Image: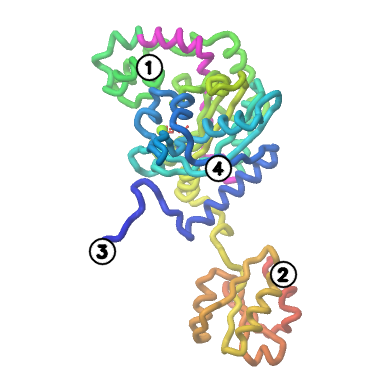
Amino acid sequence: MAKIQAIRGMNDILPEQTPVWQFVESTVRRVLAQYGYQEIRMPIVEQTDLFKRSIGEVTDIVEKEMYTFEDRNGDSLTLRPEGTAGCVRAAEEHGLLFNQTRRLWYTGPMFRHERPQKGRYRQFHQIGVECFGMNGPDIDAELLILTARLWKELGLAEHTRLEINSIGTSESRRVYRSALVDYLGQFKADLDADSQRRLESNPLRILDSKDPSTRKILENAPSLDDYLDEESREHFERLKALLEAAGVNYSVNPALVRGLDYYGKTVFEWITDSLGAQGTVCAGGRYDGLVEQLGGKPTFAVGFAMGLERLILLLETLELVPEHVNSNADVYVTAMGEGALAPALVLAEQLRAALPERVIVSHCGGGSFKSQMKKADRSGARYAVILGENEVANGTAGLKPLRADEPQAEIAQDKLADTLAAALAN
Ligand code: ATP
Ligand code: MG
């Protein structure tokens, strides 16, 4: 019978890969905790209307990327393509936003029906951060300072750069949009097909078209910058000053508009040049209109999401995964002969109690001395503890260094934990 395989674009994350994931996840978790951010966990499935109303009907995500289905009650549900909409829905539903400030984060799988390729999958994982009730630009700056610290902790500071822009209020974008449409309309026939379509539906998205002929036309297009309202302009100037004071390098990219409708004022992307076209590892911005748009009171909001697959790909491509991340054993405890089985399990337990930070792997399944030592070596452990019936009778254990050319030592069992603690510390 043919074997059933995973769905295209949805990846298994295998035991060899999970240590890097855990390294990235735990680093992010630690940094977010340092800044006082709280975790929130939302369902993976939401009502389809939530995404239509927040992300926007004429965006790529809603037009062609969502996994939408009818459940058994005939309701239209969608696997979340991103986390902001659900986070706002949950925060609003549980009264987290009224008259208070919030710094929230979440992590989990997101689903988009895109063409799978390196750095682009149909199930992928994000860590998202959303802040509510703060007008900024100080909180905008905090988010960028926080991400800059994160890149440093992950060893990626030299491999990421920050682009920022201000896309103004919806009113200033409306005026700009019609100027842009007037201009581009004159060259309609020379635009790529996507851009022609967007001229009606979402003209701002034409600004990040990659098509050479469209790019050429865009060179002389009106600039959003000239249409910015005074408040957005001032917000952006203050943000830039804060970033400079904090030593966060950035460049202003006037063509940066982001693909989701809910953004306004500040938008930003962290980009790497080491992953080809899928170079954006973290993206976000301000979305002060969204809470109200979803039925809540007007609430200041700003956030970002980073793609974990891309961050991990980047660490692996640049060979920046720290060595300690991949070792999954410190000590391997063997048992030679039936009479050593129970004592070996007991001894391993004593070592775990005494050395709670260390990984103590017990050999299970019997086998010859040679095969047990082979397994000990493959485990990556630095030491093998060898327990045979003689050692059991003497109250000792053999301690064999596996990564250094040193002889095996005979150690009293009650001294073993201290000996290992000292040996593993250097
Ligand atoms: P892109 O321009 O690469 O399509 P996007 O603008 O659609 O990205 P966002 O919706 O802002 O991306 O999501 C934030 C981050 O999530 C991206 O910067 C990226 O790191 C990651 N991401 C988005 N879509 C995917 C995907 N299909 N596969 C893997 N990671 C993704
Ligand atoms: Mg996309």
Q: Quadrant of residue 360?
A: bottom right
Of labels 3 and 1, the one closer to you: 3
Which amino acid is tagged 4? Thr
Which amino acid is tagged 3? Met
Give the residues in magenta. 154-181
Of labels 2 and 3, the one closer to you: 3
Of labels 4 and 1, the one closer to you: 4
- SS category of the residue bearing label 1: helix
Q: How dense is the environment of label 3, judged by Cα within 10 Å: few (below 14), some, or many (20 and up)?
A: few
Q: Earlier in the sequence, mark 4 or mark 1?
A: 4
Relative to 318, residue 262 above or below: above
Q: Is residue 272 visible?
A: no
Q: Earlier in the sequence, mark 3 or mark 4?
A: 3
State the residue at coordinates (35%, 37%).
114
Image coordinates for residue 127, horizontal then vertical, percent: 55, 40
- SS category of the residue bearing label 3: loop
- SS category of the residue bearing label 2: helix
The residue to which callout 2 is attached is 353
The residue to which callout 1 is attached is 203
Q: How dense is the environment of label 4, judged by Cα within 10 Å: few (below 14), some, or many (20 and up)?
A: many
Q: Quadrant of ligand 2?
A: top left
Q: Earlier in the sequence, mark 1 or mark 2?
A: 1
Marks 4 and 2 sit apart, C-alpha to C-alpha, by 32 Å
Image coordinates for residue 120, horizontal then vertical, percent: 39, 41
The residue to which callout 3 is attached is 1
